[in-house]
Image (spheres, rainbow, N blue to C red):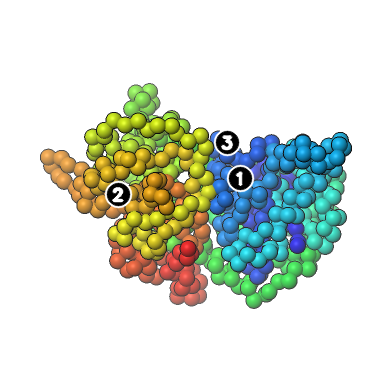
Amino acid sequence: MRYILVTGGVISGIGKGIIASSVGTILKSCGLRVTAIKIDPYINIDAGTFSPYEHGEVFVLDDGGEVDLDLGNYERFLDIRLTKDNNLTTGKIYQSVINKERRGDYLGKTVQVVPHITDAIQEWVMKQAKVSVDDDGAEPQVCVIELGGTVGDIESMPFIEAFRQFQFKVKRENFCNIHVSLIPMPNTTGEQKTKPTQNSVRELRGLGLSPDLIMCRCATALETAVKEKISMFCHVEPTQVVCVHDVSSVYKVPLILENQGVVNYFCQRLNLPVDMRHRKILSKLLKFFFFSPGFHVSIALVGKYTKLSDSYTSVIKALQHSALAINHKLEVKYIDSADLEPATLKDEPVKYHEAWQKLCSSNGVLVPGGFGVRGTEGKILAINWARRQGKPFLGVCLGMQLAVCEFARNVIDMPEHNPGQMGGTMRLGKRRTIFKTDDSVMKKLYGGFEYIEERHRHRFEVNPELKHHFEAKGLKFVGQDEEGERMEIIELEANCPLYKSPVFFVSGHTYFVGVQYHPEFTSRPIKPSPPYFGLLLAAVGKLQSYLAKGCHLSPRDTYSDCSDSSSPETDILELNFPSL
């Protein structure tokens, strides 16, 4: 097993996750089996209790693990399936050590940070690195480990010490350290500054780790003189200083690393068994992310946490994957759902009208998952407008539940009922959904399978006793769980009336869908999530033709020609979704 540790300096949020994912991608493109571990120094057991504004979105894995959003990057880049133990926190480590102490495993010895905590970290990493993350069940050959935070943080010290020891335990020829650092360029001088990186590397070396590669995050390409200066003061060769400048798409980062000889360095430094024939796969695949889309599509994202895009990272990626597949440039219009409510009209009328203008000018509407009461009325208003106007709509988790509430309020005279006790824990992880009818848009988008498996994260559910009231009015529950007790997918019938007035009458809806699960967690760059893909197709007016063609797109509907070939690979062109 080879281990690649990614540390960061100067500031947090510097892009360690993208760089770790990109390193894994270029190694996997060489025929190697790659896994990834994310270490977060916070004391929380997992990310499940975080506010999205605190730490970005909570990413959910197949086994129900609520983890850091960087694990979503690993899965998307590497097309792998991770487990909750691939996310290691201070809380998990201390909990495991305390449990051992209570059982008497330490035979009465004084339990200390060194060696007990540091040993536990090393044992966890070595054990988890061997767990297969691919469908073939084979043991990985390379483990990329990202250490969150910045070097010098108090909470990171036990992990730094653990890896100082770890490099000798696994032998130096099997261990490599990448240090990611910021190269600021003040506007007043326009000069790239190396001092923060020098200080960060000096501190890291003082703690016992010497970086093998220094990856410099900068706004523009690194100047040769700056590169040589970093090399001289940080005790590395100039070829070990890698520039990772700002780019328009994170999917370009693997090629940036590839072009600077990172693969060759790893081959020599870690003696990796690279199959050179596979290296073309990376360039061929990533070419599809450099084309210039010929058309434009806008989606209104109506949510509670729209001030921080990281709150909806997977949702945005799923939309981008789908827009890419149909050769459209995506514009996401972030709308705070509370701004759509009457209270905002009274207190801040400009904000209210701006929010409604964004909604009305969009090609489609997406209401993602969320928790809490705040902003729910605004989401319901957006759903009502989308349903009545025939605007393509996708509701995810809470978005689906609110779509049911909106339909009940405005279409059905609901009987009084007692919902009973709500569960005290969430339903998490991969669950099976059974399609109940063949005449379903979602079933067709999923390839006609009888069932699907997607990841869940919810506490509330639709009351199955009320199902018949909705279906009698045209809102169909086309997907349910295996017991038929949980409503998983809703669709508005095509012939369901949308809007009546003395002047005109509109019937039929292009795409009004809600899903209880979170399909964005399994979306991939060349395997877009079917619910999101359907939304984008409907938003650009191509859904019906796509379904009529048996769920295949023609070349002119997908990627523009961005290489010497006339069309991309067949499996990408036809957008085949993975078999279940």
Q: Which mark is residue 49?
A: 3
Separation of residues labelled 2 and 3 (CA atoms): 33 Å
Separation of residues labelled 3 and 1 (CA atoms): 11 Å
Q: Residues within 10 Å of mark 2 (few under 14, many from 20)?
A: many
Q: Which residue is mark 2?
A: 476
Instruction: Compare residues 47 and 417 and report the one nearer the observer.
Output: 417
Separation of residues labelled 1 and 2 (CA atoms): 35 Å
Say what amino acid the circle numbered 2 marks: Lys
Say what amino acid the circle numbered 1 marks: Asp
Which element carries disc 1, helix, strand or loop?
Answer: loop
| Quarter containing the N terminus | bottom right
Label whose residue precedes the other's in the sequence (2 or 3):
3
Say what amino acid the circle numbered 3 marks: Thr
Residue pictured at 79% horizontal, 53% vertical: 211
Which element carries disc 2, helix, strand or loop?
Answer: strand
Instruction: Compare residues 565 and 271 and report the one nearer the observer.
Output: 271
Q: At which x and y percent is residue 573? A: 44, 69
Residue pictured at 44% horizontal, 62% vertical: 325
Residue pictured at 45% horizontal, 48% vertical: 517
Q: Is residue 30 visible?
A: yes
Q: Which residue is mark 1?
A: 68
Identity of the residue furthest to the top in this view: 347
In this rendering, the answer to whether 572 lies above or below 213 is below
Q: At which x and y percent is residue 75? A: 58, 56
In this rendering, the answer to whether 253 lies above or below 563 is above
Give the foreground label among 2 and 3: 2
Q: Residues within 10 Å of mark 1 (few under 14, many from 20)?
A: many
Q: Residues within 10 Å of mark 3 (few under 14, many from 20)?
A: few
In this rendering, the answer to whether 441 lies above or below 58 is below
Label whose residue precedes the other's in the sequence (3 or 1):
3
